[in-house]
């Protein structure tokens, strides 16, 4: 089992991860000092975490007391419904709310706890639910266990600073805890904290709880089930280089271990089916403005956001050179692909009225000026090549992190917990399918919908050690190998996220929007 190559001889490739102590040989005359990278990652994350806690707590206080000390946009629905629960009106429900009551139960619990020792306003107490989730639960409970298994893959301080999430550390919205519960479900599958069977049931329970915050998490429950099955099928059915055969082995193993691997998640699927029968729709409340469609352009929007946030991971002169050579080697294929993208833009773009009616979201400005620009020069000739590149980036950046298998050599692992935090072609297919199912039916262009597609993609991606510019020059034979590292890229990812966070907080604070029918100044958020 080894890391897959990029399919190009021009890009430095990691061979079969030959390990000599704590040094990884990644090619002739090139090595990685894994011990130094791991130690540095732990130290930097510990120090930066303290700084981040101070930053988010300070900005939370400032935002809550100075910028928006009032209910902001959808908070009026979420806060109002939670107050109904606090006052004991458990049967009351606002028909404008489209998500289940998971957040309101957490808010009720936090209010009952905090009201014993503080006189803070109800709004502040409820917003604390997300602050606590973002700066404590997400990095420590969800990301830390995965980091212990893959310290060179990602930094918890970076993912807790992911810009699409951090905006909701200051507000009372459902997105953060929806993300926390479903990612914690994945963490249980990968780290097995309660043993083999106990961890699967814990994962299933957490995935079910996540659906109380966002119904589409039932789709990601299916992805996590695929990962759980795969990590045992890889070993017990001995996956090999025959991909089609591995799919068959996967399904056979799912049937063989139905009671231990499928049944826990099947309980969630059955309960969700009952919910659909009862509600006659996946959406609660305001169904008229949230009807499903076939918004295929959503995939390009999603890949665009993923490529934008992952610039420090994919950017290199070598990566750009490979992309350029791909175009030059087969320009006809490129033109056909561009034409296909244009057809998707023309016939499978949905323009929801909410997008053009609410200038309090970055989506309004992005769509108006770029994605939905009426100018054909912008909408087709400019955006189509961009969509082509970001789609390429999405797949090719991930490809070296995919598990690949050999024909003859048996897999040298006996326990799923010893497998690397990687996807095989089976679960990679499931990730693509789940991304498609969760975003394409939505007619609304909403960056928040891309949080989970990004997180699941990022957690299984191992950052490469390729230099940002130029190529690695291997040491001559007989000389000590050249040492490369991914630490710089991981650090750049963190600072890239924080730069975006500083910018969005600046806009939030200094660029208010006046709405005549609102008593307070409005602000711009994701």
Image (spheres, rainbow, N blue to C red):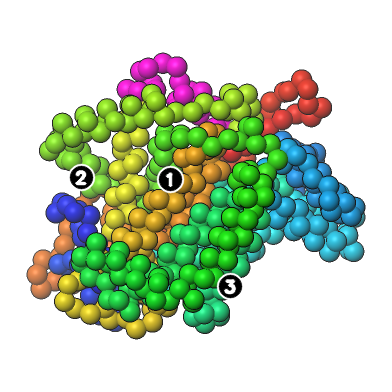
Name the residue tied to disc 3.
202
Q: Give left or right: position of 202 versus 409.
A: right
Q: Residue at x 64, y 53 (%)?
A: 275
Q: Residue at x 59, y 38 (%)?
A: 526
Which region is colored magenta? 362-381
Q: Is residue 364 magenta?
A: yes
At mark 1, the secondary structure is helix
Name the residue tied to disc 1.
436
Q: Residue at x 27, y 72 (%)?
A: 239
Query: Residue 36 sits in which quadrant?
Result: bottom left
Name the residue tied to disc 2.
322
Measure how far apart labels 3 and 1 are at the Cα level: 26 Å
Categorize mark 1 by other alpha carbons within 10 Å: few (<14), some (14-19), many (20+).
some
Question: In what quadrant of the picture does the N terminus appear?
Answer: bottom left
Question: Is the residue under label 2 in contact with that under label 1 (CB below 8 Å)?
Answer: no
Question: Is the residue under label 1 in contact with that under label 3 (CB below 8 Å)?
Answer: no
With respect to residue 108, does 291 lie above or below?
above
With respect to residue 482, does 393 lie above or below?
above
């Amino acid at each position: 089992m080894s890391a897959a190559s990029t399919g190009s001889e021009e890009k430095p490739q990691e061979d079969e991860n030959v390990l000599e102590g704590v040094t990884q040989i990644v090619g002739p005359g090139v090595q990685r000092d894994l011990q130094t990278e791991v130690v540095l990652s732990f130290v930097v994350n510990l120090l930066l975490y303290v700084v981040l806690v101070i930053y988010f707590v300070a900005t939370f206080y400032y935002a809550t007391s100075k910028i928006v000390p009032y209910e902001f946009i959808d908070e009026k629905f979420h806060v109002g419904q939670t107050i109904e629960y606090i006052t004991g009106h458990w049967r009351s429900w606002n028909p404008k709310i489209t998500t289940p009551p998971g957040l309101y139960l957490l808010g009720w619990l936090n209010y009952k706890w905090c009201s014993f020792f503080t006189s803070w306003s109800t709004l502040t107490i409820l917003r604390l639910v997300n602050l606590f989730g973002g700066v404590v639960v997400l990095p420590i409970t969800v990301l830390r266990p995965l980091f212990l298994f893959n310290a060179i893959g990602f930094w918890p301080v970076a993912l807790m600073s992911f810009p699409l999430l951090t905006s909701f550390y200051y507000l009372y919205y459902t997105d953060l805890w929806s993300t926390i519960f479903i990612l914690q479900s994945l963490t249980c599958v990968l780290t097995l904290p309660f043993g083999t069977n106990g961890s699967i049931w814990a994962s299933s329970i957490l995935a079910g709880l996540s659906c109380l915050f966002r119904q589409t998490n039932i789709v990601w429950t299916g992805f996590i089930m695929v990962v759980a099955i795969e990590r045992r099928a890889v070993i017990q059915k001995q996956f090999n280089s025959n991909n089609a055969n591995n799919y068959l082995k996967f399904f056979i193993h799912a049937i063989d271990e139905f009671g231990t691997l499928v049944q826990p998640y099947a309980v969630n699927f059955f309960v969700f089916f009952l919910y659909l029968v009862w509600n006659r729709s996946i959406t609660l409340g305001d169904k008229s403005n949230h009807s499903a469609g076939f918004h295929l352009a959503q995939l390009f929007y999603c890949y665009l956001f993923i490529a934008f946030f992952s610039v420090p991971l994919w950017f290199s002169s070598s990566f750009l050179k490979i992309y350029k050579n791909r175009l030059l080697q087969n320009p006809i294929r490129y033109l056909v692909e561009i034409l296909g993208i244009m057809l998707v833009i023309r016939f499978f773009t949905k323009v929801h009225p909410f997008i053009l009616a609410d200038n309090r979201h970055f989506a309004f400005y992005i769509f108006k000026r770029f994605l939905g620009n009426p100018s054909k020069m912008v909408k087709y000739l400019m955006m189509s090549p961009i969509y082509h590149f970001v789609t390429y980036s999405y797949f090719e950046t991930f490809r070296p992190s995919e598990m690949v298998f050999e024909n003859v050599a048996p897999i040298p692992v006996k326990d799923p917990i010893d497998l690397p935090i990687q996807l095989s072609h089976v679960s990679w297919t499931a990730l693509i399918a789940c991304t498609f199912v969760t975003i394409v039916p939505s007619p609304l262009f909403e960056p928040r919908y891309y949080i989970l597609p990004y997180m699941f993609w990022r957690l299984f991606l191992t950052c490469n050690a390729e230099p940002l510019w130029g190529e690695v020059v291997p040491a001559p034979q007989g000389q000590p190998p050249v040492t490369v590292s991914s630490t710089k890229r991981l650090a750049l990812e963190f600072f890239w996220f924080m730069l975006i966070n500083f910018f969005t907080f600046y806009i939030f604070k200094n660029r208010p929007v006046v709405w005549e029918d609102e008593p307070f100044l409005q602000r711009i958020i994701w």
